[in-house]
Amino acid sequence: MAAEARPRTVLDLVAMKAAGRKITMLTCYDALFARLLAAADIDLLLVGDSLHQVLGGHETTLGATLDQMVYHAASVRRGAPDRLVFVDLPFLTYQVSIEEAIRNAGRVLAGSGAHGVKLEGGAAMAPTVRALVERGIPVLGHLGLTPQSVHALGGYRVQGRDELTANRLMADAQYLEDAGACGVVLELVPAPLAARISGTLTVPTIGIGAGAGCDGQVLVLHDMLGLNPDFSPRFLRRYADLASTVREAADRFAADVRSGRYPGPEHSFE
């Protein structure tokens, strides 16, 4: 695959790994930001259930609904029609039964035009991943810190620091690949372990707080843009400070309105 080529299908992701080309992914929830990212050097857009936190102000992702995911994914697809788009399956839309997972994942793809879904879990979810893939639904796995299991994991903590958990994550990653997953997100995993997992898989790994040894990286767009200044995990690099820009612009608008500088004649109609 040419270095400058865009991934058009999930098969291209494996080719990118084989070619040693790092994969770039950002979360996206609306058409406006999707249009901006479609003009940037970003390979994949993830409509994450993190929208429940980022846009909704909730503490966890657990309350996100399938209707929300379909709505936001359709918006992203309209804004970025030439980018691969994956969508998180929300909590309890795929864990109850394989039949429900197939139905709900199919609804996401049919209702949004997205290319695939992402779900959390390892060996226990491998049969579900296999069933989805066999029905033509591409799947990204998600291991390490899995936000839908935040209460069971005891909070937002690095996973895989002990030998038992590290070995389980290694095995889980292989289960997901064997089941047909086209890639695996590794979240809050020690960098040496993430690199080991990446080296054992044919499909790419995409890290968030998992070090440079992964085959790609993902961040939450609003965090990367500095729109959430109160959120400062170690793994986050802010590439802009838009929170200050927004506040300053709003203050200038308020000052201009109160002083009579806005609207001026050039903003008015006869």
Image (cartoon, rainbow, N blue to C red):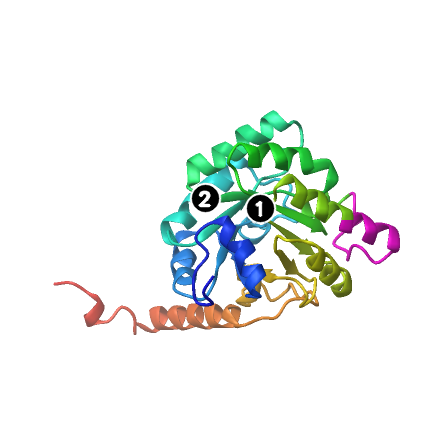
Query: Which of the pair 81/257 is nearer the observer?
Result: 81
| Whether residue 36 is visible | yes
Q: Residue furthest right?
A: 163
Give the residue number, with chain letter if any, for mark 1: 49
Residue 171 covered by magenta stretch: no
Residue 238 pos. (x, y %): 58, 71
Pick whichever of labels 2 and 1 is earlier in the sequence. Answer: 1
Give SS at disc 1: loop
Q: Quadrant of the C terminus?
A: bottom left
Residue 239, by quadrant, is bottom right
Give the residue number, with chain letter if any, for mark 2: 114
Residue 142 pos. (x, y %): 66, 48
Q: Residue at x 72, y 56 (%)?
A: 197
Give SS at disc 2: loop
| Whether residue 150 is visible | no
Question: As shown in the figure, which amino acid type bears the numbered disc 2?
Answer: Ala
The magenta stretch is 152-170
Q: Residue at x 30, y 74 (%)?
A: 261
Question: As shown in the figure, which amino acid type bears the numbered disc 1?
Answer: Asp
Q: Residue at x 42, y 56 (%)?
A: 34
Residue 166 pos. (x, y %): 82, 54
Rendered view: 246 above or below 107: below
Q: Which mark is residue 142?
A: none
Residue 160 pos. (x, y %): 80, 55
